[in-house]
Image: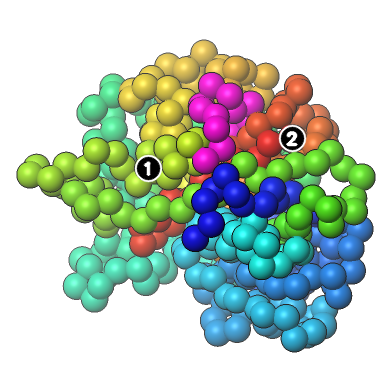
C-alpha cells in the first residue's frame, strides 16, 4: 500500500441529504437516489462523471446500492454495497476516499441510506445464544454501560438528560432533523422508563433517510464552495481484552487493552490528520443514547475520563461553547437511519466548514470531526479540514 504521505489529496466535491423521518410510501432507493442527485447538483457534476460508487445500508438486502442507482441510471461503473452497522456510511465514505487518494479513480460516490423497521432495532450482530439471552436489545446494553459509567464517574440521570436537552435545542435549527422541538428537563426525566437508568427521551429516535457525497481529486473539483479536504478517515474493529461486546461490562483482567476501539480509531485519525483534539472546531459525536455522547467525548480525547458531565453543565459543548458538539441535533434530534447515520454526521461537518450551517453555524470553523460506532463492534472517525 502506498505510504500515507504519498497519497493524493481528496476533496469533497458535493454533498446531499434528505429530510429524515418516517415515510410509509417511499423506499430506501427513493431516499438514496434523492441524496445522490442532490450531491451531484451541489458538486456541479453529472452522473456520467462518477467512476465508482460505495453504498452503505444495513437492512435493505442484496444489491441495495444498485437499486438506488438504478433510479438514476446504470452506467456499468462498479457499485459496492457496504454493511457495517451504524458506521456503514462512514465505511463507504472511507472506501471512496481511499480509491481517490490511491489514484484508482478521480470521482467517486459514497452514499448511505436506510428505511428502518419499526420498533426497537432488531440487531442480528449476535450469535444465537446471545440473541436468546436478549443481548440484541440495545437500550439494555447501553443501560448497563451507563450504570457502570455512573459508578465510575459520579454522572447522574440529570447529566444524561442535559445531553438530550442540548441536542434537541440544536435540532430546532436543523430543517432536516426528525425532531425540531426543544424538550425540558422535566419532560426527559419523566418520560417512559426503557431500561434503568435510561428513559425514552434518553434514546435516539429511528428514522428513514439518506446522505451522499461526491469525493474527487482537487483538479476535478467543479463547485465554487470552499475547498474541504479529507484529512483522515479511519476504521477500527473490536480490541482484544476490551469489555464483552454485548454488554461491555466484563473487560479482560489478564489482558486489558491499552485503549478501546474508539480511542484507537481517534488516535489513528489524529496521527494521519496531523492534529489533535485541541485543533478540532466542531464535533459530531455518536449519541445513539444520551449518555453515550459523554463517554464518546472522553474516549475521543476532548476531556479526561469523568470530566464530560461537568463540562456539559458549563456549556462547553453548546453551539457557542468551546467545543460545539452535535450542532445539528445529533442522533437525538436528527434521527437514526442506521446506514445513513454516519453520513448525516459528515454532512454537518462539511456544512460547518463551508460556513453554510445558517443559524447553527460555528464561527470560523476550520477542522471538524465525526465519530460513529457500529455493531461488530467497529468505530469510524472522519476528520475534515478547509
Quarter holding the C terminus?
Answer: top right
- Is residue 256 something one can see in this rendering? yes
Q: Residue lying at the far left in this picture: please name it.
A: 254
The reply, left or right, for residue 259 in relation to residue 61 is left
Residue 367 x %, y %? 66, 31
- Other residues around mark 2 within 10 Å, as few (<14) / some (14–19) / many (≥20): some
* Distance from the alpha carbon under mark 2 to that under mark 1: 24 Å
Name the foreground residue: 231 vs 253: 231
Residue 354 pos. (x, y %): 80, 37
Colour style of the rendered protein structure: rainbow
Residue under the image location 12 percent in, 45 percent down: 255
- According to the picture, the residue beneath numbered tag 2 turns out to be 386
Q: Which mark is residue 293?
A: none
Q: Earlier in the sequence, mark 2 or mark 1?
A: 1
Residue 349 colored in magenta in the image: no
Numbered marks: total:
2
The dot on residue 264 is 1
x and y percentages locating residue 92 in the rendered image: 58, 63
**Residue stretch in magenta:** 272-284
**Residue at horizontal 72%, vertical 27%?**
365
Residue 114 visible in the displayed image:
no
Say which residue appears at 35% left-offset and 68% top-offset. 125
Instruction: Determine which quarter of the picture holds residue 160.
Output: top left
| Residue 278 forms part of the magenta stretch | yes
Amino acid at each position: 500500500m502506498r505510504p500515507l504521505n504519498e497519497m493524493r489529496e481528496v476533496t469533497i466535491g458535493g454533498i446531499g441529504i434528505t429530510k429524515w423521518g418516517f415515510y410509509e410510501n417511499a423506499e430506501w432507493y427513493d431516499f438514496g437516489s434523492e441524496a445522490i442527485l442532490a450531491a451531484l447538483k451541489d458538486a456541479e457534476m453529472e452522473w456520467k462523471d462518477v467512476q465508482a460508487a460505495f453504498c452503505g445500508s444495513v437492512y435493505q438486502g442484496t444489491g441495495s446500492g444498485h437499486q438506488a442507482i438504478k433510479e438514476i441510471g446504470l452506467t456499468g461503473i462498479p457499485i459496492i454495497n457496504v454493511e457495517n452497522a451504524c458506521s456503514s456510511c462512514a465505511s463507504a465514505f472511507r472506501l471512496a476516499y481511499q480509491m481517490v487518494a490511491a489514484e484508482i479513480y478521480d470521482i467517486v460516490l459514497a452514499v448511505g441510506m436506510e428505511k428502518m423497521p419499526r420498533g426497537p432495532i432488531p440487531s442480528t450482530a449476535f450469535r444465537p445464544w446471545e440473541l436468546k439471552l436478549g443481548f440484541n436489545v440495545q437500550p439494555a446494553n447501553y443501560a448497563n454501560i451507563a450504570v457502570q459509567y455512573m459508578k465510575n464517574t459520579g454522572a447522574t440521570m440529570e447529566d444524561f438528560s442535559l445531553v438530550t436537552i442540548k441536542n434537541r435545542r440544536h435540532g430546532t435549527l436543523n430543517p432536516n432533523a426528525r425532531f425540531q422541538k426543544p424538550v425540558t428537563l422535566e419532560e426527559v426525566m419523566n418520560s417512559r422508563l426503557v431500561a434503568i437508568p435510561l428513559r425514552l427521551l434518553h434514546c435516539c429516535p429511528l428514522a428513514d433517510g439518506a446522505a451522499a457525497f461526491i469525493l474527487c481529486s482537487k483538479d476535478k473539483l467543479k463547485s465554487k464552495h470552499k475547498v474541504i479536504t479529507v484529512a483522515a478517515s479511519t476504521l477500527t474493529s473490536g480490541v482484544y481484552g476490551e469489555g464483552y461486546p454485548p454488554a461491555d461490562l466484563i473487560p479482560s483482567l489478564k489482558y486489558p487493552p491499552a485503549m478501546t476501539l474508539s480511542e484507537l480509531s481517534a488516535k489513528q485519525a489524529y496521527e494521519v490528520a496531523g492534529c489533535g483534539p485541541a485543533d478540532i472546531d466542531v464535533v459530531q459525536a455518536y449519541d445513539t443514547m444520551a449518555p453515550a455522547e459523554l463517554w464518546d467525548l472522553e474516549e475521543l480525547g476532548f476531556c479526561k475520563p469523568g470530566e464530560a458531565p461537568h463540562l456539559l453543565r458549563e456549556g462547553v459543548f453548546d453551539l457557542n461553547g468551546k467545543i460545539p458538539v452535535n450542532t445539528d441535533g445529533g442522533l437525538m434530534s436528527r434521527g437514526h437511519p442506521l446506514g445513513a447515520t454516519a453520513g448525516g454526521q459528515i454532512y454537518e461537518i462539511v456544512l460547518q466548514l463551508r460556513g453554510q450551517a445558517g443559524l447553527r453555524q460555528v464561527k470560523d470553523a476550520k477542522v471538524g470531526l465525526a465519530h460513529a460506532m457500529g455493531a461488530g463492534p467497529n468505530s469510524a472517525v472522519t476528520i475534515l479540514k478547509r
